[in-house]
């Protein structure tokens, strides 16, 4: 089968398309014939050796896949060949087939296409875990989403609206903000033009925002924290800007606020049943049109480097999908 391989830490152009052996389903496993594989910003970091997870070489990028069950191993009764499914694999999604534990695979309804399904697990799984499990949300509270047009930011806008929050989309262009407004945001702030702290204060009538969802980091994080309301919750999602901010802890004291880490991967491993329930709920929401799982663009497997460059340039609004 065809696969994109990373054999040493490298940039997108150094990845290689090659042939490798087909996977075989072991006990408790199933082989998925991959129809769509979703890329995330951390795939760039992973191939460069800058991510906290460092797979053994050689590996493929892409941590989410959707497709059709091709075969099942001994002991698997929950799946059968032909089932339409989605799964998180951590890495190795940029290939034609993959063997995964059956317990990690979720069936999808016919109403949900493979492209949209493949982009649900990590971005929406992260956003739902962050907003529902970590943020202690109350209906009517304000939610500021940084990087609101990216994969995780867009998911937070849509899920925030679904949870009854007043969503303020924050992004670096008017085009991105208009896109976020189409996907759940009620208010917008262009932090390339306007001061983030002052803007968020103004949009909340001086009260500050109740919840900050930050997948960006860099210089925006401290400004957002300075805009937070009394007993607000600052959610640390990731660092797409590249720099990990060092927060002045006196702000947490003065505002009586919480800085809460959101590590979806660890949560999924430690709470598999709750995570599976979250993902099944998201699949249903996507099938019903409550969340868009918007696909920005798709690429054939041979153009994985081009797909990763779209993410590197922060050009994507929604998900970037590979078609093995």
Image: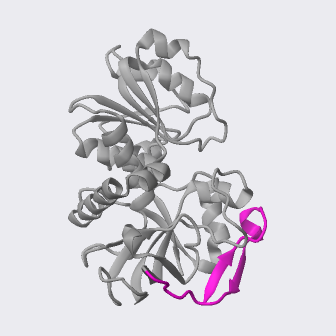
Left/right of residue 122 with respect to residue 277 in the rendered view: right
Q: Position of residue 244 (x, y in %)?
A: 64, 35
Left/right of residue 97 with respect to residue 128 in the rendered view: right
Left/right of residue 7 with respect to residue 242 in the rendered view: right
The structure residue drawn at horizontal position 39% and vertical position 47%, both measured from the top left corner, is 127
The structure residue drawn at horizontal position 55% and vertical position 84%, both measured from the top left corner, is 96
Residue 96 forms part of the magenta stretch:
no
Quadrant containing the N terminus is bottom right
Please tell me in which quadrant of the rendered image residue 242 appears.
Answer: top right
Compared with 277, 79 (above or below) is below
Residue 24 forms part of the magenta stretch:
yes
Q: Position of residue 269 (x, y in %)?
A: 45, 55
The structure residue drawn at horizontal position 43% and vertical position 32%, both measured from the top left corner, is 189
Front one among 324 and 99: 99
Please tell me in which quadrant of the rendered image residue 136 appears.
Answer: top left
Please tell me in which quadrant of the rendered image residue 187 appears.
Answer: top left
Front one among 174 and 226: 226
Q: Position of residue 185 (x, y in %)?
A: 32, 41
| Magenta-drawn segment | 1-27
Residue 319 visible in rendering: yes
The structure residue drawn at horizontal position 63% and vertical position 63%, both measured from the top left corner, is 308
Front one among 301 and 91: 91
Question: How many marks are shown on the rendered structure?
Answer: 0
């Amino acid at each position: 089968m065809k696969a994109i391989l990373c054999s040493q830490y490298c940039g997108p152009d150094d990845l290689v398309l090659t042939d490798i052996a087909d996977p075989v389903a072991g006990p408790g496993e199933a082989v998925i014939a991959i129809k769509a594989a979703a890329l995330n910003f951390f795939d760039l970091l992973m191939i460069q050796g800058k991510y906290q997870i460092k797979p053994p070489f050689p590996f493929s990028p892409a941590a989410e896949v959707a497709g059709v069950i091709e075969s099942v191993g001994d002991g698997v009764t929950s799946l059968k060949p032909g089932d339409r499914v989605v799964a998180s694999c951590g890495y190795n999604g940029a290939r034609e087939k993959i063997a995964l534990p059956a317990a990690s695979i979720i069936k999808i309804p016919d109403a949900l296409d493979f492209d949209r399904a493949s982009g649900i697990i990590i971005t929406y799984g992260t956003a739902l875990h962050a907003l529902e499990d970590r943020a202690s949300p109350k209906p009517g509270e304000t939610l500021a989403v940084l990087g609101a047009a990216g994969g995780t930011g867009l998911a937070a806008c849509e899920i925030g609206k679904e949870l009854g929050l007043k969503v303020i989309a924050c992004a670096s262009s008017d085009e991105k903000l208009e896109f976020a407004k189409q996907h759940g945001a009620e208010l917008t702030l262009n932090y390339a033009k306007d001061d983030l702290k002052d803007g968020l204060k103004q949009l909340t009538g001086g009260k500050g925002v109740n919840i900050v969802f930050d997948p960006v980091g860099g210089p925006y994080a401290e400004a957002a924290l300075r805009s937070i309301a009394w007993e607000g919750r600052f959610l640390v999602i990731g660092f797409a800007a590249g720099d990990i901010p060092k927060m002045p802890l006196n702000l947490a004291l003065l505002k009586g606020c919480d800085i809460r880490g959101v590590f979806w991967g660890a949560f999924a491993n430690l709470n598999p049943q709750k995570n599976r329930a979250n993902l099944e709920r998201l699949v249903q929401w996507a099938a019903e049109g409550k969340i868009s799982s918007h696909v920005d663009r798709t690429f054939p497997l041979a153009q994985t480097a081009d797909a990763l460059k779209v993410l590197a340039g922060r050009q994507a609004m929604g998900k970037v999908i590979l078609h093995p």
